[in-house]
Every structure is written in structure tokens, then in C-alpha cells.
């Protein structure tokens, strides 16, 4: 079988997008370049003390920014603006969106939303982290300054989404609405190769991923679902599910995508809307999981149906294998 690089794969599949102008390919190419730089930096983190630790600043949500958060944010934004293919970007690390107002960028039709380094508090302990991105067609007219409404679109409007996982190897996993494909980075050659074509999440799984430290303040149906996961009635072999929680969303998601499982970040007393951000984390992963045959909900609603009211809005988040989400939803709907 021919071993495709990301670039070759994009060219090969471009004909499946009617009216394709090559702009989306250039966006993916910018993301690919930035991810190689970030990946290289992350790999050096244990050796270079100037890379590790807090930058001393907080982001808009009052969370401590790591030095690598700032580095990854600048690297992705610079790579995206340099290509002249998007008119603006919104990042989890910035208060507001950035409008690229030079003429070339202003004529572009896409915007990007990005979480440049998710799970960055794990870097100091050598645990996998990730980058999550999503691409939308702008609503405002070409040639005019990008508007907030361009970024506040429901997940169903996504043109592409994906993530980078900086793990035992670095991988790019993305969708443009035609299935999900995964590419593994070969650091010797500096190229991503197609390693996981047409990824599908198993319809059922045996892994649940949730921060159980918050269990006492979850809503009753979620508590009941966790009890169900821990019971001996789940699988044909009558064993409880395994609990696996890294605390790094992309890593937990990636494992469950491959093996089958459910990831949950429910609402709790301290976090009435959960922790994760609809725009930068939940929507892009929801697009991916649906393309891979799974489901993503926020209690009663499908994630992809929710129109964000603000850039940094949080939602309770449940994502994974179809039958596992079905079971959770059944408990939520019956209001146990
Ligand atoms: P971040 O965007 O500030 O990195 O936070 C998101 C991370 C996710 O990667 C992870 O799943 C979650 O926060 C873990 O939160 P908790 O420590 O509350 O379980
Ligand atoms: Mg994040």
C-alpha cells in the first residue's frame, strides 16, 4: 500500500470537495508546520528549564498560563496568519478573537478556533498534551473585518476539525466531514504519514474516563451511570468497565477513539457548566467523534447543535462510543 504523507493525502482527497480552492489545504499545512515546532519544543521540555513551568500570567479564564501555552499560542497564530488563508483566529489563550486585517487575509473565507496546548499542566510531569482546532466558513462578507458572529457558530457548521497529540509519538487526526484519518509524525524525516486511515470508534467500549474526585457533586443520573460502569453487568464477560483518566483531554479522547470508551466532564457544584469549552474543545471533538461513528452530548443536547453565546463558554461534556452515550442519555432522560 502506498504510504501517504498528509500533503499527498490532502491533494488526493481534494477532488471530493466541490468548489475547493485549496485554502483549506493551506490551513492544514500551516497547522502541520506549527505542530512540528511545538512538538519539537515539548520534547525538549525536560532538558530546558526555560520551557517548563508557569509564565506568571493568567488567561482570560483566570487559569495559570504555562510558558509552553504562550509559545504554542504564538506559534499557531503566526503560522496561520502568515499563509494569508484565514481572516481571523480565536484562541483559548486570548480574551477575544484576532482579526487579520491585511488585504490578503481579509479576502479569505475561513476562521480558525484553537486550543493551542490542551492539558498543559501535564507537561511538567511528562504526560501527553494536545492541540485542538476547528475551521468555519465566515458569515461576514469577504473583504470586510471578521466579526464575533463568525466564531459563534454551531458545531454542525464546521468545515474541518482535528487535533494533534504530542504523545509517545506525535499524531495529527482530522476530519473534513468525510471520515477521520490519523497521521503519525516521523521525526527522522520531518513528515506526517497516514497511519490510521478511516478511523472508527467501536460502538461499545469498556473504558470510562472522568475525574471521580468530583463524584459527590455530580447530578444523580451521572452518578448512576458511573455506578453502572462499575457494576458487573456491562459486558458479555460480566466485568466492570475500566476507569482510565489521564486529565489530558486529547490523550483520554484518543485512547477512547481507538479502543472504545466514554469521556465525561459533567457539571458539578464547583463547575455548574463543567470545565471544558464548547468552541475550542467540545465542538471540534464532537465533529470528529460523529465522523468516526460515535456520539457527543451535553446532558440532553447534541454538542454539534449548540450555538455558542460567547467565545469561552463552557458546557458539560460526554463523548465516546455510541452505545455508551445512549445508555447515559437514557438515564439522564429518565431523570433518575
Ligand atoms: P486546559 O484547557 O486548561 O488545559 O484544561 C483542560 C483540561 C483537559 O485536558 C482535561 O481533560 C481537563 O482539563 C482535566 O480537568 P480536571 O483536572 O478538572 O480533571
Ligand atoms: Mg484546553
Image (cartoon, helix red, strand yellow):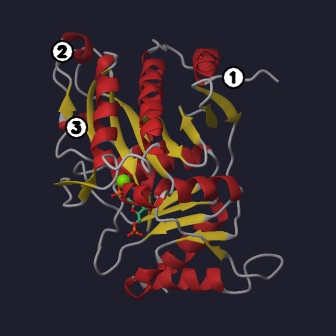
In three-dimensional space, the C-alpha distance between marks 1 and 2, rounded to whole angstroms, equals 35 Å
Mark 3 and mark 1: span between their CA atoms? 37 Å
Residue with the mark numbered 3: 149
Ligand 1 positioned in quadrant: bottom left
Q: Mark 2 points at which residue?
A: 102
Viewport quadrant of the N terminus: top right
Q: Is mark 3 on a helix, strand or loop?
A: helix
Q: Which residue is drawn at 57% across and 48% down?
A: 290
Residue 212 vertical placement versus 279 (above, below): below
Of the numbered discs 1 and 2, the one sitting upstream in the chain is 1
Q: Is residue 107 left or right of residue 226?
A: left
Select label 3 or label 1 by which is in front: 1
Q: Which numbered disc, 1 or 2, marks the residue closer to the eye?
A: 1
**Residue 16 seen in render:** no
User: x and y percent of residue 44 in the render?
Assistant: 45, 43
State the image coordinates of residue 265 (x, y, percent, origin top left): 43, 68
Residue at the image point whose x is 53% and y is 65% from the top: 263
> Which residue is at 18% across, 15% downward?
102
Q: Position of residue 270 (x, y in %)?
A: 28, 78
Q: Could you give the CA–CA distance between mark 2 and mark 3, rounded to whole angstroms?
A: 20 Å
Between 264 and 225, the residue placed more toward the observer is 264
Q: Which percent across, then down, holds residue 157? A: 41, 37
Residue at the spot of label 1: 4
Mark toward the start of the polypeptide (3 vs 1): 1
Amino acid at each position: 500500500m502506498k504510504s501517504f504523507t498528509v500533503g499527498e493525502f490532502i491533494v488526493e482527497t481534494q477532488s471530493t470537495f466541490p468548489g475547493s480552492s485549496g485554502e483549506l489545504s493551506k490551513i492544514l499545512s500551516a497547522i502541520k508546520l506549527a505542530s512540528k515546532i511545538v512538538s519539537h519544543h515539548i520534547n525538549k521540555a525536560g532538558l530546558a528549564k526555560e520551557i517548563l513551568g508557569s509564565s506568571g500570567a493568567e488567561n482570560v479564564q483566570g487559569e495559570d498560563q504555562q510558558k509552553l501555552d504562550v509559545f504554542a499560542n504564538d506559534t499557531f497564530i503566526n503560522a496561520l496568519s502568515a499563509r494569508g488563508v484565514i481572516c481571523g483566529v480565536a484562541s483559548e489563550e486570548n480574551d477575544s478573537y484576532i482579526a487579520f486585517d491585511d488585504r490578503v487575509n481579509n479576502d479569505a473565507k475561513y476562521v480558525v478556533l484553537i486550543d493551542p496546548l490542551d492539558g498543559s499542566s501535564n507537561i511538567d510531569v511528562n504526560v501527553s498534551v494536545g492541540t485542538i482546532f476547528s475551521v468555519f466558513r465566515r458569515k461576514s462578507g469577504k473583504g470586510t473585518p471578521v466579526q464575533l458572529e463568525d466564531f459563534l457558530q454551531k458545531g454542525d457548521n464546521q468545515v474541518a476539525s482535528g487535533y494533534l497529540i504530542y504523545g509517545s509519538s506525535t499524531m495529527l487526526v482530522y476530519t473534513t466531514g468525510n471520515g477521520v484519518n490519523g497521521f503519525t509524525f516521523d521525526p527522522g524525516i520531518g513528515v506526517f504519514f497516514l497511519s490510521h486511515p478511516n478511523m472508527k470508534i467501536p460502538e461499545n467500549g469498556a473504558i470510562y474516563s472522568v475525574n471521580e474526585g468530583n463524584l459527590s457533586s455530580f447530578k444523580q443520573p451521572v452518578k448512576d451511570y458511573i455506578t453502572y460502569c462499575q457494576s458487573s453487568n456491562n459486558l458479555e464477560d460480566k466485568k466492570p468497565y475500566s476507569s482510565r483518566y489521564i486529565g489530558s483531554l486529547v490523550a483520554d479522547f484518543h485512547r477512547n477513539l481507538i479502543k472504545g470508551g466514554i469521556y465525561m466532564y459533567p457539571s458539578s457544584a464547583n463547575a455548574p457548566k463543567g470545565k471544558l469549552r464548547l468552541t475550542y474543545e467540545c465542538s471540534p471533538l464532537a465533529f470528529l467523534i460523529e465522523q468516526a461513528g460515535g456520539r457527543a452530548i451535553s446532558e440532553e443536547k447534541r454538542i454539534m447543535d449548540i450555538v455558542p453565546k460567547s467565545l469561552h463558554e463552557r458546557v458539560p461534556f460526554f463523548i465516546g462510543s455510541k452505545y455508551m452515550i445512549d445508555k447515559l442519555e437514557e438515564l439522564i432522560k429518565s431523570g433518575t
